[in-house]
Image (cartoon, helix red, strand yellow):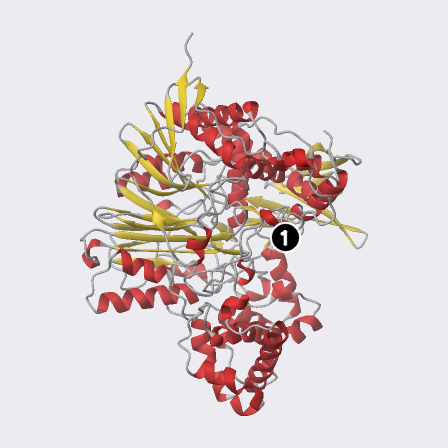
C-alpha cells in the first residue's frame, strides 16, 4: 500500500477521534498539512456507471429519479439486492469503507499512526466478533442469502471501479466487501446509539457531590409532564406500573449512575403520529426526523425497491441493504432513540492472567491482534474476554486500570431480519412480529397503517437483580461475585434473552389517538427499569403542545400541519428564561437596551432573521458557563459533566450554583452575549446559524464542503439543528396513509463531489422544504440494466 504518509497521518488523527451518531464525524481540518491533490486524483474519478451490468441473480433495473434516488425493480429479491449493493458502492463506497475500518480497528492500516489509539479501542471491544455472532445468527436464512447477494453487488462495483477519488488521496484500493462488513455497519449504528461510558463518569460525580446535590442534578425525573405515553394517550397501554416497588429500595449512596438524564451527545430524534380519528383524510399520518451527525455525504441513503407485491421506499445506511425507515403501500415507520440502559460495567479480583468468578479462578479468553500501521510500526493488542463480555485495560498515571464491559450488541442479534421484514409488513400485526427481532439498538418504534397508530419500545433490555431485587444498571457491579448478571446472555455467541424484559412488558401503546416521541422518558412508571438517559424534554413538550392545541380545536390534522410542526422553531428554553432575563434588566447596562427590547417583543422562535434569537443563543451558552463553570472547574470536571438543560432552566433563583443570586448570573450572561455578538459583527441569528456540513477532507479541499446557508432552529427546537449544524435532522419524512409522501436529506445522494447530486437537496433542507417521496418509476427508463448470467 503506497501513498502520502503526511496525508494519512492527518486523516488518522482526525478520523480516529471518534464518530457521531450513525457515521463518521465530519472534520473540517482533515488535510490541512497535506499537499494539494495531483491532477490524476481529480481526473476520471466520477465515472458514469455502465448501462448494463451482469448479475448472477437474474434481471433487475435501476432507474434514478431527478434526485438520484434509485428505483430498483426485479423479479426476485436476490436480483434486487444485488443491484442495491452495486448502487450503494457506486454512490457511497468510501463512506462504507471508513465505517467498516473504524469498527474493525483497521483505520491505521489506511491512514497511519494517529489512528492507532482508535484501532486499539475498537479491537479491544471486539466489535467484529459481535458482528460475526450476528452473521452466525443469520446463517441459513433467507435474509442471509439476500445480504450475500447485496455483498456480491458491492464487490461487482469494486471490481469494475473506478474507486472514489478519496482512495487515490490516501493511496490505497478498496478491498472486497463481506457479509460481516454489513453487520459491522449495524454494530456502528447500535454502538453510536446505545454504547456509553456514562456509568463511570457518574461514579466520579457521586464522589464529587454530596448525595442530595447529586440527586437533584442527575437523578430527579424531569417534571415537564410530557412522557411519550401519557394518561390520555388512548388505546391499549402496555408495560406500565405492574412492578412499581422494583424501582425503589436502591440506596442512592451505592449508585454510580449511567448517564441518567443525558442522551448521547448531540443526538436526538422526533417522530409523532396522528390517527385517522383526528385527520382530514380519516387515515393516520406519520412525521419523522432522526437527529444524527450532519456530514458530507449524509448518513442516510434513500432508495426504493420493488419486487412482486413488495414496494418499499425510504432510507438506509450505506452498507445495509434494506430500507430501515420509510414506508410501503401498507404502512410507514420510524425510530427514535429510547435511552435504555443496555451496557454494564464490572470489576474483578484479578492477578493479571486470571480473574476470580464465583469463587473460581478463570483464565481470560485472550487473542492477540495486530494493528497494521501504514508507513509506521505495527502494534500488538491483546483482546481479553470474560464471562460477561470484554475486559478493557488502560494505563492511567503509570497504573493499569481495567473494567469489564457487557453490551447487548456483543451477542448474535437479529435486527437485520427485522429490518428486512418491515418492507414486507402488511399492517400492525406483521410489524409487531418483526420488531420482536429488533434486538439492538433499543428504540422508540412508531408505526402507522391505514387503520391505527402503534408505539413500542424495542430492543433487548436486561433485567438486573441484586440480592433478589430488580435494580437499574446505574452502578459498577462486582463481576467476581456474579452480581446483576444478564440471564440468557451469551457474549459473542447466541443468546436466549430469557432474563431480559419481556416484549409485552416494554412500554407501548396500540391504537393511540396521537402520540409523539422526542427522546423523553417513555412512561412515568415502567414495569421494569428501562434507563434514565432521556432528553430534557423541550422538544417533546412542544410537540405535544402543538398536537394538543390542534386536536382540542377539532381542526383536522393534515400533511401541511405535520410539515409546519416539523418546521416549528419555538424554543421552550427561551420561553422559560426570557421573563427572568427581563426582570433582571436593572442589573444590566443601558447598552443592552436594544437587545432586551428585542427579547421583550420576541415570540421565542429561533429564526434566521431574528435579533432576539441571536442574543438568546449566545446568552444561553454564557448562562450555562456562568452557572456551572466555576463549580465544575474547581472539581477539575469538564463541560461533559455538566447537568442537562432542564436542570439549568429550573434551578431555583436562590440556588447555590448561582451563589444565591440568579439575576446576577442572568445579567452577566447577557453582557457576555452582547460582547460576543459585537466582536463577531453579527446582526441576526442567520448571520451565525449557517449550515457547516463538511467533507472529511474539507479543511484543505474546501470545495468538497457543502455550501453555507442560513437556517433556523436550535438543538432544543423541533426544527432541529445543533450549534454549528454538526448534528440535527438527518432525514425528514412525512407519510400520510392517504396522500403523497415527502422526504429530504441534508445534502445529496451521491458521495462524489463531481456529481450534480452531491448537495442538490441541501438548500431545500436548510429552508425546511421537501421533495416528493413518490412510488412511481421515472419515465426515463432504466439507468442500469442488470442482466442475468446465462450458461
Apparent side of residue 311 relative to residue 325 in the rendered image (left or right): left
> Who is closer to the viewer here, 65 or 471?
65
Say if residue 241 shows up in the picture: no
Query: Which residue is rendered at x = 58% and y = 70% of the image?
Result: 214
Report the side of 791 relative to 237 (left or right).
Answer: right
Considering only vertical position in the picture, is 253 above or below 410?
below
Residue 127 can be seen, yes or no:
yes
Q: Considering the numbered disc 1 on the image, is that residue within a helix, a strand or a loop?
A: loop
Left or right, residue 734 beside residue 707: left
Residue 737 image point, x, y percent: 24, 47
Choose between 696 and 175: the one closer to the eye. Answer: 696
Q: Position of residue 624 (x, y in %)?
A: 58, 73
Identify the residue under disc 1: 28
Q: Locate residue 524: give its quadrant.
A: bottom left
Measuring from the top left, give residue 704's x and y in whole percent: 59, 47
Image quarter (top left, top right, bottom left or bottom right) of the N terminus: top right
Residue at x-position 34% and y-position 62%: 565
In this view, 597 is above or below 105: below
The residue positioned farthest toward the top in the image shown: 791
Residue drawn at 54 percent across, 64 percent down = 251
State which quadrant residue 206 falls in. Answer: bottom right
Amino acid at each position: 500500500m503506497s501513498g502520502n504518509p503526511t496525508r494519512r497521518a492527518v486523516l488518522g488523527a482526525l478520523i480516529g477521534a471518534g464518530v457521531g451518531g450513525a457515521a463518521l464525524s465530519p472534520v473540517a481540518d482533515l488535510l490541512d498539512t497535506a499537499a494539494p491533490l495531483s491532477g490524476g486524483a481529480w481526473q476520471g474519478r466520477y465515472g458514469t456507471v455502465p448501462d448494463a451490468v451482469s448479475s448472477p441473480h437474474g434481471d433487475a433495473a435501476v432507474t434514478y429519479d431527478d434526485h438520484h434516488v434509485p428505483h430498483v425493480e426485479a423479479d426476485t429479491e436476490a436480483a434486487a439486492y444485488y443491484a442495491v449493493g452495486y448502487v450503494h458502492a457506486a454512490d457511497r463506497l468510501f463512506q462504507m469503507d471508513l465505517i467498516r475500518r473504524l469498527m474493525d480497528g483497521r483505520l491505521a492500516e489506511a491512514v497511519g499512526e494517529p489512528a492507532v489509539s482508535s484501532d486499539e479501542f475498537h479491537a479491544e471491544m471486539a466489535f467484529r466478533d459481535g458482528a460475526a455472532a450476528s452473521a452466525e445468527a443469520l446463517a441459513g436464512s433467507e435474509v442471509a442469502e439476500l445480504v450475500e447477494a447485496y455483498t456480491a453487488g458491492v464487490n461487482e462495483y469494486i471490481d469494475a471501479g473506478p474507486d472514489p477519488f478519496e482512495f487515490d488521496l490516501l493511496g490505497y484500493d478498496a478491498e472486497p466487501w463481506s457479509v460481516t462488513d454489513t453487520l459491522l455497519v449495524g454494530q456502528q449504528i447500535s454502538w453510536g446509539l446505545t454504547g456509553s461510558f456514562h456509568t463511570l463518569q457518574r461514579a466520579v460525580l457521586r464522589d464529587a457531590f454530596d448525595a442530595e446535590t447529586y440527586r437533584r442534578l442527575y437523578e430527579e425525573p424531569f417534571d415537564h409532564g410530557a412522557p411519550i405515553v401519557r394518561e390520555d394517550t388512548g388505546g391499549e397501554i402496555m408495560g406500565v406500573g405492574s412492578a412499581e416497588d422494583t424501582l425503589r429500595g436502591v440506596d442512592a449512596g451505592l449508585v454510580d449512575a449511567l448517564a441518567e438524564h443525558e442522551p448521547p451527545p448531540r443526538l436526538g430524534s422526533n417522530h409523532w403520529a396522528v390517527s385517522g380519528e383526528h385527520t382530514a383524510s380519516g387515515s393516520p399520518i406519520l412525521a419523522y426526523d432522526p437527529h444524527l451527525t450532519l456530514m458530507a455525504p449524509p448518513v442516510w441513503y434513500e432508495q426504493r425497491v420493488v419486487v412482486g407485491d413488495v414496494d418499499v421506499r425510504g432510507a438506509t445506511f450505506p452498507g445495509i441493504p434494506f430500507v430501515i425507515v420509510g414506508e410501503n403501500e401498507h404502512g410507514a415507520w420510524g425510530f427514535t432513540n429510547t435511552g435504555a440502559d443496555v451496557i454494564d460495567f464490572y470489576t474483578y479480583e484479578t492477578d493479571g492472567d486470571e480473574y476470580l468468578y464465583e469463587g473460581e479462578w478463570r483464565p481470560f479468553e485472550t487473542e492477540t491482534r495486530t494493528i497494521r500501521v501504514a508507513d509506521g510500526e505495527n502494534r500488538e493488542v491483546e483482546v481479553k474476554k470474560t464471562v460477561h463480555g470484554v475486559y478493557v485495560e488502560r494505563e492511567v498515571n503509570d497504573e493499569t486500570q481495567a473494567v469489564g464491559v457487557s453490551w447487548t450488541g456483543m451477542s448474535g442479534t437479529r435486527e437485520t431480519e427485522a429490518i428486512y421484514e418491515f418492507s414486507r409488513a402488511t399492517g400492525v400485526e406483521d410489524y409487531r412480529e418483526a420488531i420482536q427481532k429488533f434486538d439492538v439498538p433499543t428504540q422508540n418504534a412508531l408505526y402507522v397503517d391505514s387503520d391505527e397508530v402503534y408505539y413500542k419500545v424495542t430492543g433487548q433490555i436486561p433485567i438486573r437483580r441484586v440480592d433478589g431485587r430488580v435494580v437499574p444498571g446505574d452502578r459498577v457491579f462486582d463481576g467476581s461475585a456474579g452480581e446483576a448478571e444478564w440471564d440468557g446472555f451469551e457474549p459473542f455467541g447466541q443468546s436466549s434473552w430469557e432474563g431480559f424484559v419481556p416484549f409485552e412488558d416494554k412500554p407501548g401503546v396500540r391504537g393511540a389517538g396521537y402520540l409523539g416521541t422526542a427522546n423523553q422518558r417513555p412512561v412515568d412508571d415502567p414495569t421494569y427499569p428501562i434507563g434514565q438517559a432521556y432528553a430534557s424534554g423541550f422538544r417533546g413538550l412542544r410537540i405535544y403542545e402543538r398536537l394538543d392545541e390542534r386536536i382540542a380545536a377539532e381542526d383536522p390534522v393534515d400533511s401541511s400541519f405535520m410539515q409546519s410542526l416539523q418546521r416549528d422553531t419555538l424554543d421552550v428554553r427561551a420561553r422559560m428564561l426570557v421573563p427572568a432575563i427581563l426582570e433582571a434588566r436593572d442589573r444590566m447596562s443601558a447598552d443592552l437596551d436594544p437587545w432586551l427590547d428585542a427579547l421583550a417583543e420576541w415570540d421565542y422562535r429561533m429564526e434566521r432573521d431574528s435579533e432576539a434569537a441571536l442574543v438568546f443563543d449566545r446568552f444561553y451558552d454564557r448562562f450555562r458557563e456562568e452557572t456551572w463553570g466555576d463549580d465544575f472547574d474547581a472539581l477539575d470536571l469538564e463541560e461533559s459533566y455538566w447537568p442537562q438543560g432542564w436542570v439549568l432552566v429550573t434551578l431555583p433563583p436562590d440556588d447555590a450554583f448561582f451563589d444565591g443570586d440568579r439575576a446576577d448570573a442572568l445579567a452577566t450572561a447577557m453582557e457576555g452575549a452582547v460582547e460576543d455578538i459585537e466582536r463577531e459583527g453579527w446582526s441576526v441569528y442567520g448571520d451565525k446559524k449557517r449550515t457547516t456540513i463538511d467533507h472529511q477532507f474539507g479543511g484543505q479541499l474546501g470545495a468538497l464542503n457543502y455550501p453555507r446557508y442560513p437556517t433556523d432552529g436550535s438543538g432544543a427546537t423541533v426544527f432541529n439543528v445543533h450549534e454549528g449544524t454538526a448534528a440535527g435532522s438527518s432525514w425528514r419524512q412525512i407519510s400520510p396513509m392517504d396522500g403523497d409522501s415527502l422526504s429530504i436529506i441534508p445534502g445529496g445522494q451521491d458521495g462524489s463531489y463531481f456529481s450534480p447530486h452531491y448537495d442538490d437537496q441541501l438548500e431545500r433542507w436548510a429552508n425546511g422544504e421537501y421533495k416528493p417521496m413518490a412510488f412511481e418509476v421515472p419515465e426515463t427508463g432504466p439507468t442500469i440494466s442488470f442482466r442475468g448470467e446465462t450458461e
